[in-house]
Amino acid sequence: MSDTETLTRLSTADADGESVTLTVNGERHALRLAPWVTLLDLLRERLHLTGTKKGCDHGQCGACTVLVDGVRMNSCLQLAVMRDGCEITTVEGLAEGGRLHPVQEAFIEQDAFQCGYCTPGQICSAVGLIREGHAHTAEEIRELMSGNLCRCGAYTNIVAAIEQAMGEQAMGEQPAARGDGR
Amino acid sequence: MNRFGYSRAGDVAGAVRERAANGAAAFIAGGTNLVDLMKENVARPERLIDVTRLPLRGIEEREGGLRLGALATNAEVAYDERVRARYPLLSSAILAGASPQLRNAATTGGNLLQRTRCYYFYDTATPCNKREPGSGCPAREGVNRIHAILGTSEHCIAVHPSDMCVAMAALDATVRVTGEGGERAIPFAEFHRLPGDTPEIDTNLGRDELVTAVDLPAESFPTHYTYLKLRDRLSYAFALVSVAVAMELDGGTIREARLALGGVAHKPWRDREAEALLRGQAPSPELFARVSDATLRDARGFGGNDFKIGLARQAIRRALSQAAAGTPQSQTDKRVQ
């Protein structure tokens, strides 16, 4: 689907679409949407939250990862209408009171990106991963971040950043010593 | 994506009625496969019936086993403490598949009904008997690295891509469905079909029927099991060959054994004659080689996938050894031991 086509469909959606209420980054939106609008297109084209990226648009790259009721998902494969009533958190909604989320801080400190295109998805995915609580080792982080591809190959530093953020959380949000940039 | 109508089912009976009334409607739950197929114009439903608000998400105790609600997500099943403790084979197989994001959205019922990832099925510019009956199967003479070696037909050599289903086949699960005629239970081995001359039909689910649950029987194989999945990259790729083994040992003798293969056929592949060779025997490399050869006696390749026969032969032997030793394959450390 071309971008022009996406925009046309979003705009024609308004007239007779489905009534949908979503809370995005704490802000409530009452919308009328055509059922074929994906959560990703809604965020980017309608709500102008362009932090969430469209990579493959087929659930294969993870660039569109957001948190739906706190759970990480590929927003490109979610029809927005089906998430009526949900709370969505995107990369724009992670900072609190002007302070970056610990995972965002860790990505900067560990230099966990190069071009940055996959980064919002990586960060949202990492926040979801930490909340899930199933990763305890670098190996487990790698496995449970496998849904987020990085074509620059920043994986080593991404794993280090997540380890750093997990360590900080384990120490009750105390600031941790800087990582060694592995 | 085509334009389509949308409705949200309030109860199972209503969902079934609506689907029965509209032959071009489709149920949608996690959407991780259907939305993708719709973006590719492979699926073009007139209407989507959203079943995600139906009360089918629970995981409950039942007759010594577990009932997995059709809407329980792949992540919820894989990480459920009872599934992990009693059916580690199922947990392991689910965690070998897809990505965490997809497992958080994808449901048990949807996983059963996911469609093949055959390149020709996905490419609407090419013929495909599964997508357009009677148009032909370019995979037979074309690029067929990922295709089937068992149970193929002249019309289709696609494989079922699920990992979860391979474990459920080995566990002898039962699929519970509801249609206009009421409820029925379908033994797992009879749920998916071989392609034959109707490859467009993946399962024996009726047009109006909705999957409501999967029942796991009491016998759970908590100790001697493995899910060994071999693929082109270590994570987040479909199986070229996968092997699920569930075994019960009595002293030094195999009392019960199940062997199911993924990535090799149009459905999770079980060969009960070959499995029977294991019962009453002591585990040994010679026995496992014999069982492996018997399982693959009718295997045939189509050029690009010839390697799967040798790969499957070794994988079955290795998986049987892992299960007998009680050392299941780790889904984190991918080294095969």
Image (spheres, rainbow, N blue to C red):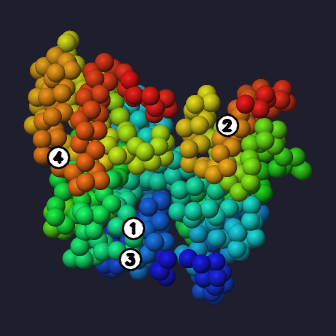
Task: Name the one closer to the observer, A65 or B6.
Answer: A65
Q: Earlier in the sequence, mark 4 or mark 3?
A: 3
**Residue at mark 3: chain:** B
Label 2 vs label 4: CA separation? 41 Å
Residue on which the image places disc 3: B125
Name which quarter of the figure residue A160 lies in.
Answer: top right
Task: Name the one closer to the observer, B93 or B173.
Answer: B93
Residue on which the image places disc 1: B122
Question: Are the numbered discs 1 and 2 placed on the same chain, yes or no?
Answer: no
Label 1 vs label 2: CA separation? 34 Å
Question: Are the numbered discs 2 and 3 placed on the same chain, yes or no?
Answer: no
Local packing at callout 3 (Cα closer than 10 Å; few below 14, some 14-19, many 20+) is few
Task: Name the one closer to the observer, B22 or A98.
Answer: A98
Are discs 3 and 1 less than 8 Å apart at CB? Answer: no
Using residue B256 as the reference point, say whether residue A111 is left or right of it.
right
Q: Secondary structure at mark 4?
A: loop
Residue on which the image places disc 2: A156
Question: Are the numbered discs 4 and 3 placed on the same chain, yes or no?
Answer: yes
Question: Are the numbered discs 3 and 1 placed on the same chain, yes or no?
Answer: yes
